[in-house]
Image (cartoon, grey):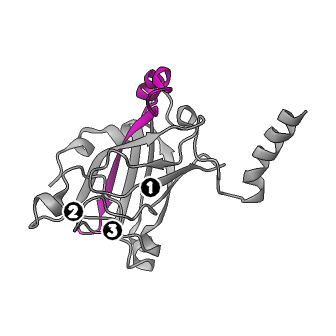
Amino acid sequence: MAAVLAAVLAGAVDLLAPGVSAQGFVAERSFPVAGACYLRRYEAAHLARHPGQVVTGLRIWGDARSLVALRREAPRIDPELTLTIRIDFADGGRAQGAVGCPERGGRIRRCGRNADCAGDVAVDLMPDGRLRIVNDGTAPREPGDAPGFNPDAVCRAVADAARPGRFVPPDAPNRVFLLDRQPLAACTEADHRKELP
């Protein structure tokens, strides 16, 4: 009886806070072994209403195969879902790289462990099936780096001062992004995998 009550109360979290999953996302539902893609492109009208927004597009994709393979090692290491995230910027640049999302208790809340020199992001699966990315892991990993999130693993702010990384600042226009699920090809087309400038 206690287990049933706990399950009912856990399910009520989304009802008490509509549109927000306090539990994080279950990797294999969001990113099955066959792969999944979540994408958001911002139209000019939206960007005009939010002049401080530096992100014109954001996509995240991958599959749970590596996570499933690592679960048998859970007593020794944190199983980790590895995803690819790409951010397109208003200045025409982009950042793309791998992010690691450690799993605890069958759920994942934060991604970014593999994003060198960057903060991390919170990830939530919304009740409507969208993915919510929250840019709130703002502490830079290297001295001198800009605060904010950048998945580009080149560490440009440290490695090349003439080409600093394009970080997503942790301010209001660049903090929360809602991504819709799309066919996997929308994230994995060849032009999305080109080397970064």
Q: Is residue 37 above or below residue 18?
A: above
Which segment is the magenta one?
63-92
Amino acid on which disc 2 is placed: Gly
Along the line of sight, which residue is nearer the eye, 143 or 6? 143
Mark 1 vs 2, N-terminal side? 1
Would residue 84 be found to the left or right of residue 15 on screen?
left
Along the line of sight, which residue is nearer the eye, 99 or 43? 99
Measured in 3D between alpha carbons, the distance from the residue under mark 3 to the one under mark 1, in whole angstroms, is 12 Å
Q: Residue 138, position in %: x, y?
A: 39, 65
Residues under numbered marks 3 and 1 in contact, where contact means CB atoms less than 8 Å apart: no
Measured in 3D between alpha carbons, the distance from the residue under mark 1 to the one under mark 2, in whole angstroms, is 17 Å
According to the image, label 2 marks what residue?
Answer: 165
Q: Which mark is residue 147?
A: 3
Identify which residue is drawn at 40% across, 40% down: 61
Query: Is residue 77 located in the magenta-colored stretch of the structure?
Result: yes
Q: Residue 188, position in %: x, y?
A: 32, 38
Mark 3 vs 2, N-terminal side? 3
Q: Is residue 7 above or below residue 167?
A: above
Amino acid on which disc 1 is placed: Val
Q: Residue 10, position in %: x, y?
A: 76, 45
Q: Residue 130, position in %: x, y?
A: 56, 49
Mark 3 vs 1, N-terminal side? 1
Amino acid on which disc 3 is placed: Pro
Check disc 1: other Cα within 10 Å, few if <14, some if 14-19, many if 20+.
many
Query: Quick one: SS at disc 2?
Result: loop
Q: Quadrant of the N terminus?
A: top right
Query: Quick one: SS at disc 1?
Result: strand
Query: Is residue 144 located in the magenta-colored stretch of the structure?
Result: no
According to the image, label 1 marks what residue?
Answer: 121
Identify which residue is drawn at 43% across, 61% down: 137
